[in-house]
Amino acid sequence: MIPAFLIPARPQRRARLALIAGCAVLGVTLTACSGGASASDRDAGKNGDAAPSKAAAASISVNLHGTSAAAGKPVTVTLAAGKLSEVTVSAGKDGMLSGRISADGRTWTSDRAAAPGTAYRVEARDSSGGSDTASFTTKAADKVNKLTLAPGKNTTVGIAQPLSIVFDNPVKDKAAVEKALKVSTSNHTEGSWGWLRDYSGRDRVDWRPKEYWKSGTRITLDAELNGVDSGQGGGFFVRDYATTFTVGASQVVKVDLDRHRLALQRDGRTVMDVPVSGGTPGGDKRSWRGTAVLMAKEGTINMRSETVGLGHTYDKMVDYSMRLTWSGMYAHAAPWNAAYFGRANHSSGCVGMSDADAAALYRQAHVGDPFEITGAETKGTVAEGNGYGAWNVSWDEWQTRSALG
């Protein structure tokens, strides 16, 4: 008998991953594709039992590879034979890309695009338990787009406050951007995005409900923009954004410039009704009409006529200032105009009232409250981008402003 230690070891057969041209092949052999037949296996074959079949080679490829891969595309992982059971694509502190395996089990595709300037690691497992990894890094963005969100996070606002996003750079691919903006509400409020030109001249998109918000509604925006290309001249977004806010008391401010009165209504009940004076008829000093939304409570500010194109007619410190438009229309205290309160419109376009009445309104009004302004002697309706004028557009028309139709 030959001693066992002199018998040469039987070589192990190991299946290797095949290279797929033009794709990054995951670099570690699938662990399920190795090993040879044992003596007991051969004996089983002699007795008529089926011998175990040799594992087939497996090849996995990734559509993005190298150190300068193109951003803005979904990640695709493909198995040449067999079925994928699990794929993870991670990006360090930026988290993981979720995705789906195709019905035939051959391909996994990420739900979102790969972000610029990001290193990714791919880990894949097949249905036989084999696993493999790959990695790639996307090219950094040549130009980055950013945005400003309103309202602020965790704020409480009035019933007319829209979700509003102003972009730093132009947005040519509005549909791609809008698809990344996910709005959810606590009571399934019906609403729509609408694209417009902000008063600053920049691209802007607002989400407004069909009707005023219901008091107590909680709204969340998840802007999953990291990796989205805003189109020519705009650049990539390189981060996600989010905000959450709550709707407060149901309040409406009604301004009747023909009667020279302002009334604050809460839950349909009038809690204030005071005399006011609006913009002087017959020229550029007229007030705007339509629905304006209280944008900010700015307190005591310096108002200068040249900033709104009215020459050098005034330069005053004004108390209890409540901004209604970007073009300079406010509701505020105007004690110098007391002779006209309740009698005539004789201001430079703002809605003025006494110190006491302005203080009371300032104390009770919320950012986001609608000011519904009527009057024959006005200079037109508040435009969508001049503050939050979307309420002056019919619901049917507003829906056509969505890039998703």
Image: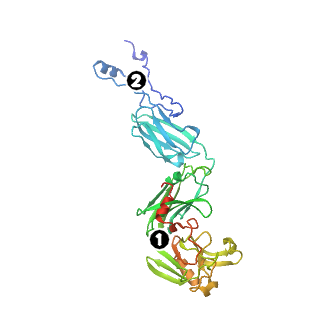
Seen in the picture, residue 58 relative to 93 is either above or below; the reply is above
Q: Residue 62: x and y, percent? A: 50, 37
Residue depicted at x 50% and y 57%: 402
Tell me where residue 50 appears, x and y as whole percent.
30, 23
Residue in view at x 55 percent, y 74 percent: 289
Mark carried by residue 36: 2
Residue 350 in the image: x percent, y percent?
Answer: 60, 77
Q: Amino acid at mark 2?
A: Gly
Q: Name which of mark 2 and mark 1 comes first in the sequence.
A: 2
Mark 1: amino acid: Gly
Badge 2 crowding class, 10 Å Cα cut-off, few under 14, some 14 to 19, many 20 or more, is some
- Label 1: few (<14), some (14–19) or many (≥20) C-alpha neighbours in 10 Å: many
Q: Nearer the viewer, residue 348 or 96?
A: 348
* Residue 53 figure quarter: top left
The residue indicated by pointer 1 is: 248
Front residue of this view, candidates 235 and 380: 380
| Marks 2 & 1, CB-CB < 8 Å contact | no
Residue positioned most to the bottom: 339
Looking at the picture, tell me which residue is in the foreground, 234 or 390. Answer: 390
